[in-house]
């Protein structure tokens, strides 16, 4: 516990999970100001937007915070026939619900990758970088290390943890299947690990000699203490912040989280093309029933972007990606400061 706190220059070994579309600079700053580690997600954003969010966070805290990158590989191919089938489906279901939908030209897709953001992180002197969906290239790791940046990888299985340890990361987030949002998996999709945190954590601890962060289903003193008993050096928590005052989640999203139970969530590729855990809604069910092939991330994510934005703005919960973990229903409405302080007091 002490080693992790010293490594990350924090007082308390708690990390707020980076949740794109939910996490705000105010949330990140509140966590860091409490002595824990806030995490700012920028995966897929432009360099300009990334710099803007970093500076907004800096204006609210002088404490360390992490910036989270997506290290996924580009989609293996653009299958235009598959994309057209998906757009036919999306246009039809949007018409049913009076949601505006404009077809997109696959040739005009523009995606940003983590390599586009490294210069911004270095120029802004970001002290900690966490990585989801894979590992950074050796030259990028070298550049970050030369600037004393600490690296946190994400593993959903023992094999991934061992790969990350060999790549040169300083710590590893061990993400159990209970966790909300995208799976951090990066080995072939056919081998998607579906291991619970309390089975996975001691197995990784037995194979990897690095500080670990336990993620998935952690929300109170019992789950925190259990994670430490199984070998973690710290915990990463996300779902309990979805309904925080500083969260960017819509009111419909927050209500869905509050009303959720242990069986409300499921894994889906419907919203983004990558496996993620969210509260089941109409769109998830209709997509599954369609039997259509879902384009890879980031293509499906791009096709869904305008639908998700409209649903978020107008509180249409059946078309919002309601990312949440299996314990999300235990969340309590409060400010980020109150939530993180309560968790700190449980240590």
Image: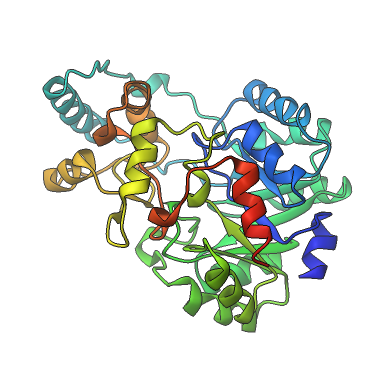
87 left or right of 64 in image:
left
- Which residue is found at the position 48% from the left and 24% from the top? 110
The residue shown at (48%, 62%) is 187
Q: Residue at point 80% right, 44% down?
A: 64
Report the number of discs.
0
Quadrant of res 159: bottom right
User: Looking at the picture, does residue 205 appear above or below residue 321?
Assistant: below
Residue 332 in percent (x, y) is at 47, 49
Query: Which sits in the foreground, 150 or 112?
Result: 150
Q: Report the coloring of the rendering.
A: rainbow
| Left or right: 327 in relation to 19 | left
142 vs 252, nearest the viewer: 252
Percent position of residue 267, x then y: 32, 55
Q: Would you say 159 lies left or right of 56 here?
A: left
Res. 76 image quadrant: top left
Residue 256 location in percent, x, y? 32, 43
Image quarter of residue 116: top right
Q: Quadrant of the C terminus?
A: bottom right
The answer to whether residue 76 shows anywhere in this view is yes
Which quadrant would the N terminus be assigned to in this image? bottom right
Residue found at x 30% / y 36%? 79
Vertical comparison of 52 with 1: above or below: above
Is residue 136 visible from the viewing direction of this image?
no
Above or below 307: residue 240? below
Outermost residue to the bottom = 206
Q: Tell me residue 164's x, y (percent).
A: 64, 64
């Amino acid at each position: 516990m002490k080693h992790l706190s010293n490594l990350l220059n924090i007082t308390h070994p708690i990390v707020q999970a980076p949740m794109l579309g939910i996490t705000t600079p105010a949330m990140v700053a509140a966590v860091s100001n409490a002595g824990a580690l806030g995490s700012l997600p920028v995966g897929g954003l432009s360099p300009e937007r990334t710099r803007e969010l970093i500076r907004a966070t800096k204006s609210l805290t002088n404490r360390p915070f992490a910036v989270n990158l997506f290290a996924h590989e580009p989609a293996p191919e653009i299958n235009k026939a598959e994309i057209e089938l998906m757009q036919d489906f999306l246009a039809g279901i949007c018409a049913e619900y009076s949601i505006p939908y404009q077809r997109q030209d696959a040739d005009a897709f523009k995606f940003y990758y983590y390599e586009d953001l490294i210069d911004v992180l270095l120029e802004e002197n970001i002290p900690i970088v966490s990585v989801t969906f894979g590992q950074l290239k050796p030259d990028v790791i070298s550049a970050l290390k030369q600037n004393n940046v600490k690296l946190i990888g994400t593993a959903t299985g023992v094999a991934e943890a061992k790969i990350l340890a060999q790549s040169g990361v300083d710590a590893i987030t061990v993400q159990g299947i209970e966790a909300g949002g995208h799976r951090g998996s990066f080995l072939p999709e056919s081998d998607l690990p579906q291991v619970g945190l309390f089975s996975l954590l001691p197995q990784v601890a037995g194979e990897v000699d690095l500080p670990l962060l336990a993620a998935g289903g952690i929300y109170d003193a019992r789950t925190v203490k259990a994670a430490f008993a199984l070998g973690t050096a710290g915990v990463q928590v996300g779902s309990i912040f979805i309904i925080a005052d500083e969260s960017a989640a819509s009111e419909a999203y927050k209500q869905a989280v509050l009303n959720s139970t242990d069986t409300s969530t499921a894994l889906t590729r419907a919203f983004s093309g990558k496996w993620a855990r969210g509260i089941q809604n109409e769109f998830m069910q209709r997509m599954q029933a369609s039997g259509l092939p879902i384009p890879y991330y980031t293509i499906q994510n791009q096709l869904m972007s305008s639908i998700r934005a409209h649903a978020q703005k107008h509180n249409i919960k059946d078309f919002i990606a309601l990312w949440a973990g299996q314990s999300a229903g235990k969340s309590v409405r409060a400010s980020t400061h109150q939530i993180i302080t309560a968790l700190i007091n449980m240590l």
